[in-house]
Image (cartoon, helix red, strand yellow):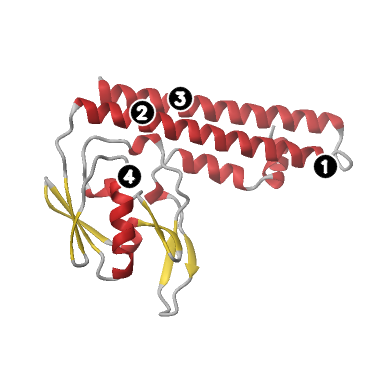
Amino acid sequence: MALGIRCFRLLHPAFSSYLADLSRPVSEVPMKTVRGRQRDHIQYSAHPAVPVRQFATKKAKGSLDHITVVTADGKLALNQIGQISMKSPQLILVNMASFPECTAAAIKAIRESGMNLNPEVEGTLIRVPIPKVTREHREMLVKLAKQNTNKAKENLRKVRTNAMNKLKKSKDKTSEDTIRLIEKQISQMADDTVAELDRHLAAKTKELLG
């Protein structure tokens, strides 16, 4: 088993980190430091795989952390370009003073986040009123969670296919028994991940709809 997993990771090293990203908030995913500004600012970008657990009905300021903003420098996490704070239980503030040129993009990302938010802007300050959670909104969140789960499964299938293709190319250097063992382990890892995604979705659906 250990040999197969080591071989699989060599064939597709992104697989393991990808599986980890699916099951934790983007704010916890290690950020890749990239240098893209002439003003010598250090920027960060996160893989935008939004896990099912992010679809919550309580809008704490951390709920906005995972939102990905499309900027001229690429996709950046909102909490990396804006200072997020809670002014009251009904209002979240996002201060874009450090990156004012990204304000419009941040507003667009918040509106399209699927969290039923309608941000307002005052200069470089984005005000995000927290709406009352209705049954309709809960059903919308469940629908969005299903869409993200299906997208994660589709991405996983692509990773699995890519790994299998790379494995086939190594047949000249690896015995047939080892190849079959690794193929079995790849399939098992993928199946286990799909099952985990389904469990997360079922738990979140129950949480939202009761």
Q: Are marks 2 and 4 in contact (CB under 8 Å)?
A: no
Q: Residue at x 45, y 57 (%)?
A: 31
Outermost residue, right direction? 172
Residue type (three-letter) at the residue carrying disc 3: Asp
Residue type (three-letter) at the residue carrying disc 1: Ser
Nearest to viewer (mark 3 / mark 4): 4
Residue under pointer 1: 170
Label disc, if present, on residue 198 of the rendered structure: 3
Residue type (three-letter) at the residue carrying disc 2: Lys
Q: Position of residue 75 (x, y in %)?
A: 44, 57
Q: Position of residue 182 (x, y in %)?
A: 73, 33
Q: Residue at x 50, y 41 (%)?
A: 20
Q: Earlier in the sequence, mark 2 or mark 4?
A: 4
Q: CA distance from mark 3 to mark 2?
A: 14 Å
Residue under pointer 2: 143
Around disc 2, counting alpha carbons within 10 Å, would you say few (fewer than 14), some (14 to 19), or many (20 or more)? some
Q: Is residue 42 above or below residue 196?
A: below
Q: Residue at x 30, y 30 (%)?
A: 140
Q: Residue at x 73, y 30 (%)?
A: 183
Disc 1 is placed on an element classified as loop
